[in-house]
Image (spheres, rainbow, N blue to C red):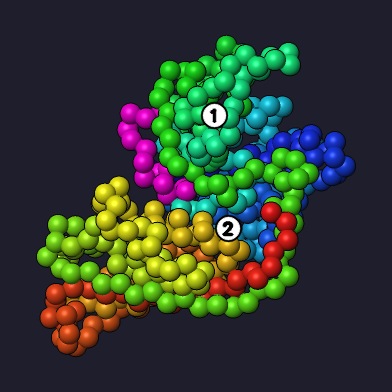
Amino acid sequence: MNIWAVVLAAGQSSRLSKGGIESKKQFLEYKGCPLFWNSVLTFARSSIINGIIITFPISEFSECEQLVQKLMLAKHPGIPVKCCLGGELRQDSVYNALMNLPDECDHVMIHDAARPFFQAALVHSLAKEIEADDGGIIPVIPCTDTVKKIKEGQVLETLIRDELALVQTPQFFPKDILINSHSIAREENFMVTDDASMVEKSGFTVKIVLGHESNAKITTLEDLKMINKTADTALPCTGFGYDVHRYGGPRPMVLGGIPISGSPGIYAHSDGDVLLHALVDAILGCLGKGDIGDIFPDTDPRLEEMSSTVFLSEALLLAQKEGLRITHVDITIVAQVPKISPFKNQIKSSLEALMGLEADQVNIKATTEEKLGFTGSKQGIKAMAVVSALKNIKKKGL
């Protein structure tokens, strides 16, 4: 797939404006740069996005173009970034961006700049799950509150909570289907609040994946606490993880989410990714949360053949909730066979994308044990992981 992302930063932030905030939310500073640029950097780190289009308000377009140029000069994201005029409505901005996509693009992710907390792992989940016949795929989280349909101050109906979900972005679509759906909407003059609704109205099926609760949207004054929160004390901490798997089993070998061709099969309950299992243990070590078996026991039938990228995503979500900022990851893979060196760069890039880390924050090493022990006799493989992080001891805000 040739995938481009569209970051929508053309909104007027009317609710924040009424609260006395003069700057539009997409331009508020977060992590040392404008809010919208955090989404650009996350997409760029995913390694599967070929380019990005950002939509900006017409009234500020020239200044926004100059801002993007400065940001790219300061630290280029490594993929093309284009600016596009926004429209009066959200769907107008999306349509303008679609008209500016290159011919080679065949799939597109649409994302609201007001959601700066999404992770590269979510981008991978969407791309992995979409199939040829799908009209699109979107992230959702379960609805935990009771929801009622109301009108004129009265309750009309209590909806079934188990049939409801809260929708997030990015949303992922085949480009041709999304363009066709937008064209129908323009012809029939109907409005929607997200692109999935438009695709649904056009008769296509939209699938779902589980989103992240941390992928929140900045909308109100209260939401600003999420980007203004600070830590009184951040102390360094280290976590160590170790895992082994035996050869001769039915599972094909996967390391860091990368299939290792020509390797022995693995005995495992999940997909047997020994590297990610050690890494999850190291993250949990930083948090003081036990080990991977405490959270994902191998006795749980639901986890059979489960991708270990899911385990990593859950560990990273827990780290975010606990105020843990991972600063460096060092991995050692020990195996007599297969030869790991041809796959090291792929594994490293995969971890950078899954964890949202820079190249100099991830290190992969591979070695043998000189034909000693169970790995030396080609009976199995093991991995060790060391995670360095900063842990917030006391937090303010949400």
User: What x and y, as percent, mark residue 307?
Assistant: 32, 53
| 255 left or right, relative to 83 | left
| 379 left or right, relative to 53 | left
As drawn, the label of residue 321 is 2
Mark toward the start of the polypeptide (2 vs 1): 1
Q: Relative to the observer, which residue lies in front, 91 or 193?
A: 193
User: What x and y, as percent, mark residue 344?
Assistant: 33, 70
Task: Using the rendered view, name the quadrant where residue 99 is placed.
Answer: top right
Q: Amino acid at mark 1?
A: Asp
Task: Using the rendered view, name the quadrant where residue 38 is placed.
Answer: bottom right
Task: Verify CB contact (< 8 Å) between mark 2 and mark 1.
Answer: no
Q: Residue at x 50, y 37 (%)?
A: 142
Task: Using the rendered view, name the quadrant where residue 192 is placed.
Answer: top right
Please tell me whether residue 67 belongs to the stretch shown in magenta. no
| 142 left or right, relative to 395 | left
Q: Secondary structure at mark 2?
A: helix
Could you give the CA–CA distance between mark 2 and mark 1, rounded to whole angstroms?
Answer: 29 Å
Count the marks: how many? 2
As drawn, the label of residue 195 is 1
The boundaries of the magenta stretch are: 122-135
Q: Residue at x 67, y 64 (%)?
A: 74
Closer to the eye: label 2 or 1: 2
Q: Residue at x 19, y 79 (%)?
A: 375
Q: Relative to the observer, which residue lies in front, 71 or 264?
A: 264
Please tell me whether residue 125 belongs to the stretch shown in magenta. yes
Q: Amino acid at mark 2?
A: Lys
Circle 1 crowding by C-alpha within 10 Å: few under 14, some 14–19, many from 20:
many
User: What x and y, as percent, mark residue 263?
Assistant: 17, 65
Q: Secondary structure at mark 1?
A: helix
Circle 2 crowding by C-alpha within 10 Å: few under 14, some 14–19, many from 20:
few
Q: Relative to the observer, which residue lies in front, 309 or 196?
A: 309
